[in-house]
Amino acid sequence: MSLFPLNRLSRAFRATLAVGALLVGGLAQAQSGTVKLMVGFPPGGGTDAIARVLAEKLKDQLGTTVVVENRAGAGGQIAAQALKAAPADGSTFFLSHDHTISILPLVVKNPGFEPAKDFVAVAGFATFVNALAVSGGTPAKSMDEYVAWVRSQGAGKGTVGVPAPASVPEFLVKVIGQKYGLDLQSAPYRGSAPMMADMLGNQINAGVASVPDFIENQKAGKIRVVAVLGGTRQAALPGVPTLAELGLAGFEDVPYYGIFAPAGTPKAVIDRFSDALAKVITQPDVHERLSAMGLTVGHMTSQQLATREQAYAKTWARIIKASGFQAQ
């Protein structure tokens, strides 16, 4: 029997092992240095605070430094474009909520990225709800009192801050105005932090953003959350009614927080990060801190996060179309 085929097989096997070793070594090297966790909003906001809680613990699980990098602007669009251009080697990840991944592609004609093509879902770690809050300079303590106060200001006109233009909060301002017969105009900001600064300074009387954006100032008595979205009241705000309770149904599907990576990132890297995140969010101190921010904490696999993102985008595509909004 000729040894030639066996030699060929041996060479092929050695080559396969060599490639595998290079791949594993490359992944280890990529994650032995600094891992960037990008955030699409400025420091000081809810998303930034969440990222810093996770980064602090992820470094122990991944065995490498994890730094939060703020790429603020355009509702996370700048950060998403940066993720698309980043190397798919496990060195760069993007912590984002629904707006950048699910909503922006519906309201911007050319956002500079396609989530299904340019990104891969790594893992989800929480859901949350948006809320309507009033500033300390507004006497209202409930939705009814806020509506009455706006009407008392003349012609039912009011301005409501939102963290980004053409966002879910902006659409909610329009829907709430229609529901109560108010002429509410949204005032878009570059993130929740500057919006909150104006609310605290009574430069703007109300805002719509996520519960994590509002929770600390709500606890401090500096603002008052008067309504939340979702199908049930929030554990962090048990005394605040849902919009459904107030007669405005259809907003029970809650947004999500997740981690995304550039398309082409190896599955081994995705799985490693997902496993690390799952361990981090089950640590009692982390779970408690995230829950206190108004999050419902729970791990979603890569596939589960991708499925949720697609379903959420489909829901809001219908709402946005019904509103008559045209992508810009």
Image (cartoon, rainbow, N blue to C red):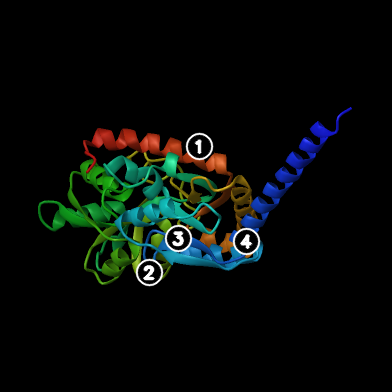
The amino acid pointed to by label 3 is Met
The secondary structure type at the circle numbered 2 is loop
Return the residue found at the far right: 1
Q: Residue at x 65, y 62 (%)?
A: 61
Residue wearing tag 1: 307
**Left or right relative to 114: residue 35:** right
The amino acid pointed to by label 4 is Gln
The secondary structure type at the circle numbered 1 is helix
Distance from Cα at disc 3 to Cα at disc 2:
31 Å
Distance from Cα at disc 3 to Cα at disc 4:
20 Å
Q: Position of residue 328 (x, y in %)?
A: 22, 44
Residue wearing tag 3: 38
Q: Position of residue 87 (x, y in %)?
A: 49, 54
Q: Nearer the viewer, mark 3 or mark 2?
A: 3
Residue 256 seen in this snapshot: yes
Residue wearing tag 4: 29
Quarter assignment of residue 103: top left
Residues tagged 4 and 2 counted as in contact (Cβ below 8 A): no
Along the polypeptide, which appears first: circle 4 or circle 2? 4
Residue wearing tag 2: 221
Please determine whether, in this image, residue 196 is positioned above or below residue 9. Answer: below
- Quadrant of the rendering where the N terminus is positioned: top right
Along the polypeptide, which appears first: circle 3 or circle 2? 3
